[in-house]
Image: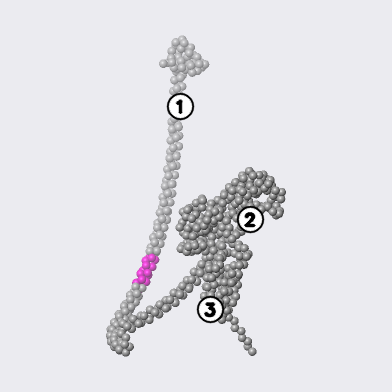
Amino acid sequence: MLRVFLKNTAMACPHHPVAMKTENLLKKGGVIFVLKDILIPILIGVAALVVGMLVGALIGYTMRKKTAEKKIGSAEKEAERIVSDAMKAGEAKRKEMIVEAKEDILKAKTEAERENKERRQELLRLENKALAKEETLERKIENFERKDEALSRKIKENEKLREEIEQIKQSQLARLEEISGYTTETAKAELVSKIETEAKREAAVKLAQIESDLHNEADTKAKNIISLAIQRLASDQVSETTVSVVPLPSDEMKGRIIGREGRNIHKIETLTGVDLIIDDTPEAITLSCFDPIRREIARIALEKLISDGRIHPSRIEETVEKARREVESSIKQAGEKAAFDIGVNGLHPDLVRFLGRLKYRTSYGQNVLAHSVEVAYLAGIMANELGVDSVLAKRAGLLHDIGKSLTQEVEGSHVQLGVEIARKFKENKDVLHAIEAHHGDVEPQTIIAVLVQAADAISAARPGARREDLDSYIKRLQRLEEISNSFPGVEKSYAIQAGREIRIMVKPEQVGDEQMIVVARDIANKIEAELEYPGQIKVNVIRESRVAEYAK
């Protein structure tokens, strides 16, 4: 072990003299010399080091002990100070809390005393009130008892009087029967009969008055509803004729349209069924046809040919076919637009197409589709005012003239055709009845039918809606005045308001106030029987008496 220690020492410091000497000694194998020269100084150094460490540790321990004692003493003093301060603060807080608690107790006690005082006062008031009521009730009971006693006495007196009256009545009745010769039952029967007669007369007078008031009220309400419907509806009217005019860019185009030996114009007329009138009118061609659909097809085709410039039979045939498809599309769009604008849903596609065909139909210059839309609006507005199904009224108004889309192709009136078309597409029975009754072919049985009939008359009769030729218009006015003048007592008559009113002057010495009603009714009935007219005619009878006297 010693050799190992010495060897390690020499290896740690190889250049140290001791290490070198140790190495040499080890090489020689001399252990004694190592112990003498090296080991002893090392042991002395180690001992000195240990002693120094012990002394240092003792000194450090002493210093640390003093420092710790000082810190402990300071901490104990600080702790005593903190505890003292805490005790002082706690004592102050305790005293403060005691004071606050005493104040709260005092407040609560004061509040309780106040509430108790108020309750005592309230109880005292209620007690006084109860006592007053009790006294009042006692007085009322006493009054009631006195009144009861007085009433009992009066009842007894009345019973005695009733017995006396009954005796007197019986004696008087016997006397009356003896004098009049009527028994009681006979007199009662006669009295009841007179009362019944008088009651019936009064009831008849009252009933007549009620009927008159109801008629006036209904007439006023109907006028208000119709006026409101007319005011809320604003629609434009388009007058149609049997001819259309197509403008030309130049008169040279007329020759191209006619073609060689007239083959182009002949082809157009053959395909469209429309007469082309080419006269001296500058830069224009007139299309004539009673069927507005065919006329529209011809107009569109001709405009396309003019704009394209290629005019020959094959091109004409192609263009006419395109124009026909455009018109069919326009018909469908017109029907869909009308249904959409009115708010009528669920129409069959074929029924929509029939409805769109009305765009190209006219009645006295009035467009039938526009007329149908107007009737639907009017019927819907009046239905809303009356609380009736407005959707159903609009549907019936829109379809009431649907038969006119076939009147040029199928035999029968437009009313019958309209009913057949609506029945084919399974329309509501109320709609069928409204279509059937809108011209009076059958008596209207529903409110919807009456509203459609009224809306149809309003739309057709308003100024500017329809057009008649001048001759028939003048003849109708003359005939209207002739009918009025044919009645006895009529002095003169005037047709005014475009034939919507006839004003009649009667002779006051021949026609009295009571007879004016009869005269007006007779004239109105004769006008209805002999004249055909849209809407209604007002018969206004006037009786005027003038008396002149001169003061001299």
- Secondary structure of the magenta portion, mostly? helix
- In the picture of the structure, the residue carrying the numbered disc 2 is 243
Cα–Cα gap, marks 3 and 1: 160 Å
Crowd rating for badge 2 (residues with CA inside 10 Å; few <14, some 14–19, many 20+): some
- Amino acid type shown at disc 3: Asp
Which is more toward the observer, 105 or 431? Answer: 431
Disc nearest the viewer among 2 and 3 = 2
Q: Pinpoint residue 351: horizontal percent, then vertical percent.
A: 51, 52
Q: In this rendering, does residue 168 appear at all?
A: no
Secondary structure, mark 2, is: strand
Quarter of the figure with residue 530: bottom right
Cα–Cα gap, marks 2 and 3: 54 Å
Secondary structure, mark 3, is: helix
Quarter of the figure with residue 102: bottom left
- In the picture of the structure, the residue carrying the numbered disc 1 is 52
Mark found first going from the N terminus, 1 or 2: 1
Quadrant (top left, top right, bottom left, bottom right) of the C terminus: bottom right
Which is more toward the observer, 484 or 460? Answer: 484
- In the picture of the structure, the residue carrying the numbered disc 3 is 513
The answer to whether residue 264 is left or right of residue 353 is right
Crowd rating for badge 1 (residues with CA inside 10 Å; few <14, some 14–19, many 20+): few
